[in-house]
Image (cartoon, grey):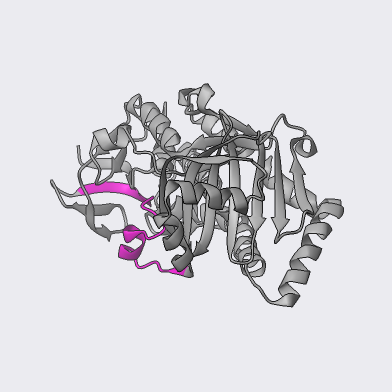
Amino acid sequence: NTNFDVVIVGGGPIGIAFACGFANTSIKIALVDKLSKNEMSKPKVDGREIALTQQSLKILEKLNVWNYVPKKLISAIKEARVLDGNSKYFLNFDHSEIKKECLGYIVPNYLIRKSLFKRLKNLKNVTVINNNECLSVNVSKKYATLKMSKGGPIKTSLVIAADSRFSKMRSKMGISAFTRNFDKNMIVCRMKHKKSHKNIAYEFFRYNQTQASLPYIKNQSGIVTTATKNLTEVLMKMSKKEFNKEMENNFNNSFGKMELVGKRYSYPMITTYAKKFTSHRFAVIGDAAVGMHPVTAHGFNLGLKGLDILNNEIKRALKNKTDIGVVDVLKNYQFKLHRAAAPVYLATNGIINLYTSNILPAKITRQFILRFVNIVKPVKQTFLNILK
């Protein structure tokens, strides 16, 4: 069958999650990805740990995906602390402030992908078109036609791009994006340590790098180091013993003896924000819409929020017997996602600019901000509302 209601290009976690949102409906969906089904069902470990908010948990539960994640491999975040330079003062977020048993949960990225694909396999209305790529899109008044690298063309009422922050589909549709290259890399890895993390996440804004730790199971933490490309190269080439010692020092011996578990992975720090999220019979979701900096861990959470908004808009249009691909239907998604994403995106980039600057006024300002947010309850509540 080459006629579908929705074609999703990109079989990553957000693309699959979007498809799962139409379980138990009559909507015919195609999910296109260049990987094989075996690669999609058995994703490789990539070093990334996902910090899920309470809101994201609700979305994954609604999608019937959370049950597929092994509970023994999930860790809770009870508290989060943000520190500046070598100061011992920290901005603190505690689970009691949102009246929940925890702020959120840590789950390895590959496990989320694996669980999503398990759910996807049970959906009879979804066709996975693997080992294939979209070469071009032609949009007419009544439908969109995708020319594929293999097989004949595919017709659909709506095309969804979920193919990363460097989205080829977004470019094919003539939509550009605001791009910010921080000229830095992120190193992610798993480390075990002697002292307990007590389910506390840490963010250390150093003057030459940023260190973060995400509390995981069995006295392990996901370690995230953001630094210049030159320093990143040095850290990646260090022996395991040298790297262990470097991390112990960077965390002020807070975890005691630390030991690398598995590999180190490096990723470039580039953020993107699509200049628009929709056009006639087309929409971008996930990183194709907004590619966040990892420092505030909002990328996947924002992606889930976006797909949930679009899912609801499409279902509302179908209930009203409205064409799901027209601009009048998609404009609500555009408005709601921009309203949710823009403040977080701009604030995150602003935080990075401020907390990686070595000039004296910036150092004084950021110390003031940590205290200001801690003390002024309405301001702090704004941050906590994101976690609810």
| Segment colored magenta | 154-178
372 up-or-down from 3: above or below: below
Task: Tell me if residue 137 comes above or below residue 304 in the rendering.
Answer: below
Residue at image position (63%, 36%) is: 104
User: Is residue 257 one of those drawn in magenta?
Assistant: no
Asked whether the viewer can see residue 233, the reply is: yes
Residue at the spot 27% in from the left edge and 45% down from the top edge: 33
Q: Residue, x 65% and y 35% (percent of image)?
A: 195
Q: Quadrant of the C terminus?
A: top right
Q: Is residue 335 left or right of residue 109?
A: right
**Residue 308 visible here:** no
- Residue furthest out toward the left: 151
Given residues 173 and 347, the one toward you in this image is 347
Magenta-span inclusion, residue 166: yes
Q: Position of residue 206 (x, y in %)?
A: 64, 61
Front in this rendered view, residue 65 or 310: 65
* Percent of width and height locating residue 275: 48, 67
In the image, residue 313 above or below residue 233: above
Instruction: Please name the residue shown 35% across and 27% down the image.
Output: 123
| Quarter of the image that includes the N terminus | top left
Q: Position of residue 356 (x, y in %)?
A: 62, 67
Q: Nearer the viewer, residue 2 or 274?
A: 274
* 137 relative to 275, above or below: above
- What is the x, y in percent for residue 384? 73, 46
Q: Specify whether 102 is left or right of 219.
A: right
Q: Which is nearer the eye, 43 or 247?
A: 247
Q: Quadrant of residue 38?
A: top left
* Residue 114 occupies quadrant: top left
